[in-house]
């Protein structure tokens, strides 16, 4: 019987993704990046948020941010921290000896004050909090970053390092909720215009462990997270390409983010997954972007 070639193998063969030997860590070809750039431009044009503050962070942040933000409560299994060699000559000899003996050399490393960014919006909250109260009509931040999550997978849509563009809203409860709801509609329109079949559904985050089930149920009961789904790997389990999150005062109470009237702010974010959107386009329109429908090419590359 002929073995079904996986979508990931098809992408490797076409050279769009480059295998590294580790599931979820891939190189990207020039064509793949042209699509990512096209999506980025489209978000800036059709998703424009006038007055948004643009800020770009590197894919690592202070370890204290991942500790304070509560990420390790919900997602200890996804977090990545940075370890470095901090020893002397003797310790260096030990490290090299371990390498020669094919033993674990990483014991010669120490955790440093960095963690890998798990979602583009994490560094935003302490940045805004450090400035003092937020003006009453709220603040929008446009942020984008490589993100890390330890979730190796054979599905090309589930990477360990991937890029996310987000708009974050920090405002009153009314403004924040309206921002999230409006983005569900805008996200639907932007992705539909790319000729992709989309559905929006209620969702929950993959909280860890036994307590995680309760957190996930509560998130669903309060309708805090929606996802925009596109079939990429299969029709049965479509892939979340955008997500729309209302955090209520989760981040604002942690970081003491206040409005000018002294009340706690509320926060929300919309996240676009660049690689997932690019893979959805390759899946639905073919591996050769030159052959994509004219309206899709015009939306991605207007010039
Ligand atoms: P999933 O339910 O598929 O794990 P998620 O709920 O974890 O997705 P979010 O945490 O909301 O996703 O992240 C925002 C966006 O980042 C997602 O909508 C998706 O497009 C993208 N994303 C999340 N995890 C990955 C991943 N492992 N690889 C590639 N893109 C991802
Ligand atoms: Zn976010
Ligand atoms: Mg996830």
Image (cartoon, grey):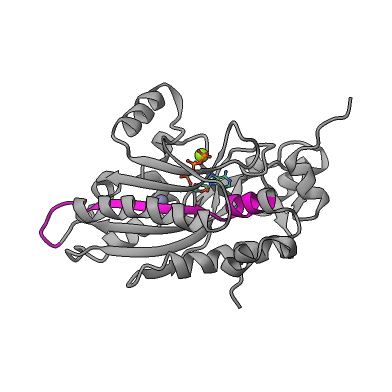
Q: Nearer the viewer, residue 5 or 250?
A: 5
Determine whether 300 is above or below 232 in the image.
Answer: below
Residue located farthest toward the left when viewing the structure as drawn: 261
Q: Which residues are magenta?
A: 260-282
Q: In this image, 295 relative to 48: left or right?
A: right
Quadrant hosting residue 101: top right
Q: Position of residue 250 (x, y in %)?
A: 28, 44
User: Number of numbered discs present?
Assistant: 0
Q: Quadrant of the N terminus?
A: top right
Q: Residue at x 59, y 38 (%)?
A: 151
Q: In this image, 118 relative to 6: left or right?
A: left
Residue located farthest toward the front when viewing the structure as drawn: 294
Q: Position of residue 266 (x, y in %)?
A: 24, 51
Residue 276, magenta (yes or no): yes
Q: Position of residue 284 (x, y in %)?
A: 66, 49
Q: Quadrant of the C terminus?
A: bottom right
Quadrant hosting residue 168: bottom left
Q: In this image, 297 relative to 273: left or right?
A: right
Is residue 182 something one can see in this rendering? yes
Q: In this image, 18 relative to 117: left or right?
A: right
């Amino acid at each position: 019987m002929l073995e079904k070639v996986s979508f990931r193998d098809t992408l490797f063969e076409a050279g769009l993704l480059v295998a590294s030997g580790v599931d979820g860590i891939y190189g990207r070809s020039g064509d793949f990046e042209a699509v990512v750039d096209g999506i980025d431009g489209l978000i800036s044009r059709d998703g424009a948020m006038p007055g948004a503050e643009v800020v770009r962070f590197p894919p690592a942040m202070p370890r204290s941010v991942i500790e304070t933000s509560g990420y390790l409560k919900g997602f200890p299994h996804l977090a990545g921290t940075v370890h470095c060699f901090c020893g002397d000559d003797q310790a260096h000899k030990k490290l090299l000896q371990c390498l020669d003996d094919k033993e674990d050399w990483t014991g010669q490393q120490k955790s440093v004050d960095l963690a890998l960014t798990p979602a583009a919006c994490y560094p935003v909250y302490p940045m805004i909090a450090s400035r003092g109260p937020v003006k009453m009509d709220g603040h929008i931040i446009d942020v984008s970053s490589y993100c890390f999550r330890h979730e190796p997978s054979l599905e090309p849509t589930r990477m360990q390092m991937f890029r996310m563009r987000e708009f974050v809203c920090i405002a009153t409860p009314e403004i924040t909720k309206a921002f999230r709801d409006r983005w569900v509609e805008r996200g639907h329109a932007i992705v539909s215009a790319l000729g992709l079949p989309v559905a929006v559904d209620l969702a929950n985050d993959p909280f860890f462990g036994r307590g995680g089930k309760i957190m996930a149920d509560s998130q669903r009961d309060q309708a805090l997270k929606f996802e925009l789904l596109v079939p990429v790997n299969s029709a049965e389990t479509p892939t979340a390409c955008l997500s729309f999150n209302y955090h209520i005062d989760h981040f604002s109470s942690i970081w003491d983010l206040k409005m000018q009237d002294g009340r706690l702010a509320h926060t929300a974010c919309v996240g676009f997954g660049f690689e997932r959107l690019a893979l959805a386009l390759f899946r639905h329109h073919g591996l050769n972007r030159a052959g994509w429908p004219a309206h899709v090419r015009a939306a991605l590359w207007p010039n």
